[in-house]
Image (cartoon, rainbow, N blue to C red):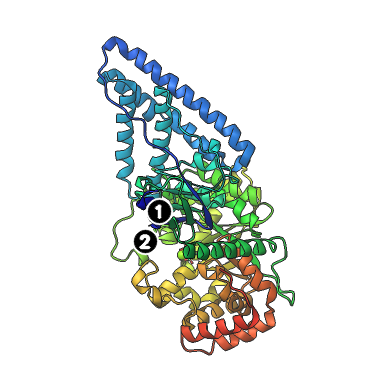
Amino acid sequence: MDLARSETRIFRGIAASPGIAIGTVRMTDRSRVAVSEVSIAPDEAAQECDRFQKALDHAREELQNLKQQIAASHGPEHLYVVDTHLLILEDTMLTRGTLDLIERELINAEAALKRNLLKFKEFFAAIDDEYLRERAVDVETVVERIMRAMVGKRQECIRSIDGGKLIVIAHDLSPTDILQIDKSRVIGVATDLGGKTSHTSILARALEIPAVVGLETITGADIDGLPVIIDGTDGTIVVNPDPETFRDYLKRKQHYDYLEQEFLKLKDLPSETLDGHRIGLMGNVEFAEEIPSLTGHGGEGVGLYRTEMLYMSRQGLPDEEEQFRAYAAIVESMAPLPVTIRTLDVGGDKLATDLHLEDEMNPALGLRAIRLSLRKPEIFMIQLRAILRASALGKVRIFFPMISGIEEVRAAKRLLEEAKGELRAADIPFDEKLEVGIMVEIPSVVVIADILACEVDFFSVGTNDLIQYTLAIDRTNEHLAHLYQPLHPAILRSLKMVVDAAHAAGIRACMCGEMAGEPLFLPVLLGLGFDELSMTSVSIPRVKKVLRRATKADAERLVARALTYATASEVEGFLKGEISARFSESFD
Ligand code: PEP
Ligand code: MG
């Protein structure tokens, strides 16, 4: 073996789907079909157009077959990926556009298709939205399929890859590639391209296949067939690990897998303390594809459905029908468990492409979230009607983000009533008892929580923003990360004020910020009296484990003590000591 192939090599990319896999590299060729441009005579144009049409038919047939295979192996939830590709195949900009180019420019079909793809790429590249830019990849994948049909070149199918414990490495993998993976053979994936929100990453997470993306040039390395470790939790790939690294990762993998198995045993057990106190453990989701993982981890409902992805993933705004379908998919798959739908929360670090937001000096303090919805009621009403319609299909709750005072709550509720009136007039069913809540993520709301509690059915504390605004720490600024302290005494006191105000008014106190999913914080949140905690799916059994070994009475004592400390580090030291005295193992 030459020296380079026997060296240990480490590649760092984007952690796209958690978990550690140890296996062998299997490079798969996803190189594009090479296309050269050839001029044709006017009387050859019809023949070229015909070749293109036949390739479209062929690609359509392949996708229909793929759809059946995926339906058989994964059920119906993920078919939307193939459906998206089928829709792209019907797009007139793609089909008519290519035929026009053949006829007008008198060039061969492959070259016309390639030129047309370049137009698509320019169009997508100009979009200032990572999620939408990623959708250009879907168009490229479909074009590649048509191209291969025209030149009669077959591509290696992930489903037919032989061997065991393979880590498939490719320049790029399409969502349909991920759906074809047989987990008994392929245990991890890594790609040059891709981001955390690409469909490929979303599906890898949904199917729980460890993945690292955005490695840029890994396919240029001569590593096919070599031993490899992929750590999808921190985005690392180690090729030819030395014995010490291998042992280290093996231990980590065994620990991770052991904990995952241990945690999953708790899946169907009640989320209740030793002294019989229940807390609802729910999931935060952005896409319907995350629901199987949520129910698989024992989620008791969706505590936060971030609807902004619908607005960020497209050109133009989603209409009522499209929103209704998206909400209905989640509500129906969770029924009878509740789905808590948050109205549009764009602005700040979340940009939507087609809302024409102006540049602001302080976007985090700007025209965002509920402020934007109230400023643009025509857009807000569409969302309200869609949510109301979905409420007829299961248990839906609605809540508003970035509320700062009572006028906003009242204005939002007025519009909600108006939307209900419109549906009633049109005889369209919805849940008349739909619960209405607010996010508590601005300090002013904490201070007047007692007043606001009389206006709504529940509070949901968004600690990601509440910490940002209370401590004046930009949540996206890595230089300030050390000051971003969930256990800061000001935060603990704020949380207490919110829960106390909620309970005094007889409404629920929930939390859906990241703080809710940290097992170390569970005793504090339990002691403060939170009724529901919503978090990313994999955290649910971890939090449940601590919950089931705790008692409410003990947690209340612990919180009373924690509230007496003057700094976050004192609180943290105290908590860690108390937790390690009660639990011998770690939770991550
Ligand atoms: C929060 O702010 O804590 C929250 C849950 O909302 P987001 O992270 O979407 O701002
Ligand atoms: Mg927030």
Q: Residues within 10 Å of mark 2 (few under 14, many from 20)?
A: some
Labelled disc at residue 36: none
Q: Residues within 10 Å of mark 1 (few under 14, many from 20)?
A: some
Closer to the camera, 158 or 493?
Answer: 158
Closer to the camera, 338 or 369?
Answer: 338
User: Which residue sits at x=48%, y=62%?
Assistant: 243
Which residue is most to the top? 43
> Pointers 2 and 1 in contact (CB under 8 A)?
no
Alpha carbons under labels 2 and 1: distance apart: 56 Å
User: Which residue sits at x=38%, y=61%?
Assistant: 349
Looking at the rendered structure, the kind of residue marked 2 is Leu
Query: Is residue 539 something one can see in this rendering?
Result: no
Task: From this view, report whether residue 284 is shown above or below residue 91.
Answer: below
Label whose residue precedes the other's in the sequence (2 or 1): 1
Residue 390 position, x and y percent, is: 60, 48
| Residue labelled with disc 2 | 367
Residue 170 lies in what quarter of the image?
A: top left
Query: Is residue 158 something one can see in this rendering?
Result: yes
Residue 359 position, x and y percent, is: 29, 58
- Element under label 2? loop
Is residue 375 toward the left or the right of residue 231 in the image? left
Residue 563 lies in what quarter of the image?
A: bottom right
Is residue 358 toward the left or the right of residue 543 in the image? left
| Residue labelled with disc 1 | 6
User: Which residue sits at x=51%, y=38%?
Assistant: 158
Task: From this view, report whether residue 241 is shown above or below residue 65.
Answer: below
Looking at the rendered structure, the kind of residue marked 1 is Ser
Task: From this view, report whether residue 508 is shown above or below residue 493.
Answer: above
Is residue 349 toward the left or the right of residue 434 in the image? left
Residue 540 position, x and y percent, is: 61, 64
- Element under label 1? helix
Is residue 175 toward the left or the right of residue 541 in the image? left
